[in-house]
Image (tube, rainbow, N blue to C red):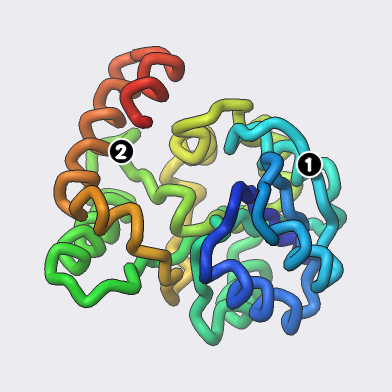
Amino acid sequence: MLSVIIPTLNTGDMFPVLLDQLSDAGVQIVISDGFSDDNSLLLAANVGANLAIGEHSRGGQLRRGVSLAQGEWFLFLHADCKLSENWRELIDDHIISHPSKAGFFGLKYDSPKLSARWVELMVSWRSMPRKFPSGWTLPYGDQGLLISRALYNQIGGYPDWPLFEDVKIVEKIGPSRLRHLGGEITTCHAKHEQDGFIKRGWRNFKLLRRYKRGDSIENLMRDYN
């Protein structure tokens, strides 16, 4: 019923925890790897995951993962996250009660810093329909995306982009077909803490604004790195 698709490239400490959560839930695990040179593939193979290996590009990896997915519903996740204990119950409830909609989780960072709480609040505000003008209701990929195969195919799926592939698919879904699942995804704080939560959030917002104004993915990717 449910295929969980995860793009990977040299995953961190949270990946084994996520795999343990998924392997106990009776779901199909699909790992779409971009030629990792750590133990990511070994960890995935040990839990019986289906493996798709190819060029590193988030959107392209997600599309490759879908090609191996067998479920009627897809859950797209990042590798550096941990799900809430009741994640499967929340998903099952959504599938039964809201089959025409896609869903996403709330976001929490595994950091005690006050700046992390501020970014979490901004993410919550940005993700909710009617909080932002039309076109700016944007849960990102680190909040997960639950979507039926039928809806995914209808909108054409993820674009083969290395950046903002999560924004594009949410734009195609539209706010009226998006729903907060309840519960949270806890994500690794390392990159955000290294750059500074506020600084990184502001940089991402400026890139998003340029994307909305029509700047090319190539230009945005150059400034993202």
Vertical placement of 148 versus 180: above or below? above
Residue occupying image coordinates x 63% and y 78%: 88
Q: Which mark is residue 43?
A: none
Q: Quadrant of residue 151?
A: top right
Residue 36 x %, y %: 67, 47
Going by the image, does 115 lie left or right of 187? left
- Secondary structure beneath disc 2? loop
Residue named by callout 1: 53
Count of marks placed on residues = 2
Residue where numbered disc 2 is placed: 136
> Quick one: label 1, few (<14), some, or many (20+) residues within 10 Å?
some
* Above or below: residue 57 compared with residue 74: above
Q: Secondary structure at mark 1?
A: strand
Q: In the image, what residue type sits under mark 1?
A: Ile
Quadrant occupied by the C terminus: top left
For the residues labelled 2 and 1, the Cα–Cα distance comes to: 33 Å
Circle nearer the viewer, 2 or 1: 1
- Please tell me which of labels 2 and 1 falls first in the chain: 1
Decide if residue 93 is in sight here. Answer: no
- Local crowd at mark 2 within 10 Å, few (<14), some, or many (≥20)? many
Amino acid type shown at disc 2? Trp
Residue 7 visible in the shown view: yes
